[in-house]
Amino acid sequence: MGNIAAFPTAAQSAAPLLRVQHVSKRFANGTLALCDVSLELGRGQFVSLLGPSGCGKSTLLKLISGLGGASAGSIEWLDANGQPRARRPELSFVFQEPTLMPWATVLRNVTLPLRLSGLARHETIDRARQALASVGLSGFEKTYPRELSGGMKMRVSIARALVTRPQILLMDEPFAALDEITRLRLNDDLLELWQAEGFSVVFVTHSVFESVFLSQRIVVMAPRPGRISADLHIDDAYPRSRSFRTSVAYAAHCDEVSAALEAGMAQRRLA
């Protein structure tokens, strides 16, 4: 991957792409997973949803994707003028597990969304090769998932998400099961892809350190029911090199986010 020019910070305005207003979600068993959640996502923003297990991060991500319906409130997609649009923009979802088809090659796995959409065969292959190249997997087109490491499988999953050229990428703890070295490398690669392609990202994580390194905004969620307890901005410029992880600014941000996370948990204990 090549060098990327400096990218806008969170302080710079971004036209809204998504508006979540007073959304609640109650499951059939009576569990209230989300309560009165409201937030906006700007075009091209990188936003992390941070919180403990059971705070509704994944539930909110699924509601945004359309994989489930809200019990109350609304989720609106906005056009360039900030007006509601009839159809949502192209989006892709990267799950916690790579969810690859074990009987299919890497190339066949990545072309799946395009084949389902009816795109011509030559175009699906060209776009899949481009997506694989973007995640550093050129030459692995004929490989099967069983022959890949965990990190490489996740790269294939990301390539499959990118092949549709989404306007928004939803990621549900995609690196949580990986070793630390692989996780840090994929964090770096994800930021380069985001800067190069310009899509918006909503990234679910349990890690304070990961959220601070990646994000322009960190939406801290508290249980139960899931709700937003803080919305923090990380204004350090991109690209963020590995030296950022050992900087004074990074440590200060981690302390601030950790304090916000603890405050959200304390609200629950006092409720």
Image: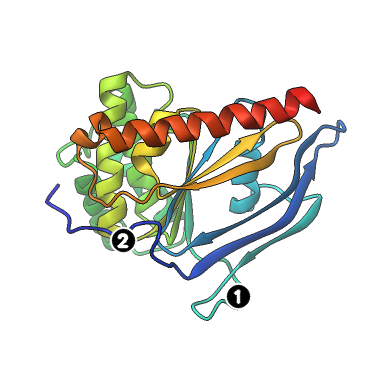
Q: How is the image coloured?
A: rainbow
The quadrant holding residue 200 is bottom left
Q: Secondary structure at mark 1?
A: loop
Nearer to the camera, 242 or 235:
235
**Residue 5 rendering spot, x and y as whole percentages:** 17, 59
CA separation, marks 1 and 2?
26 Å
**Residue 168 rendering spot, x and y as whole percentages:** 46, 57
**Which of pointers 1 and 2 lies earlier in the amino acid sequence?**
2
Residue 96 vs 194, above or below: the answer is: above
The C terminus is located in which quarter? Answer: top right
Residue 80 vs 12, above or below: the answer is: below
Residue 85 is marked as: 1
Q: What count of labels does the image hold? A: 2
Q: Look at label 1 and name its amino acid.
A: Arg
Residue at x 48%, y 34% (from the top left corner) = 257
CA neighbours of label 2 inside 10 A, class few (<14), some (14 to 19), many (20+): some
**Mark 1 or 2, closer to the camera:** 2
**Residue 83 rendering spot, x and y as whole percentages:** 60, 78
Q: Secondary structure at mark 2?
A: loop
Nearer to the camera, 178 or 227:
227
Q: Look at label 2 and name its amino acid.
A: Pro
145 displayed left or right of 22: left
The quadrant holding residue 9 is bottom left
102 displayed left or right of 183: right
Residue at x 29%, y 46% (from the top left corner) = 191
The residue pinned by badge 2 equals 8
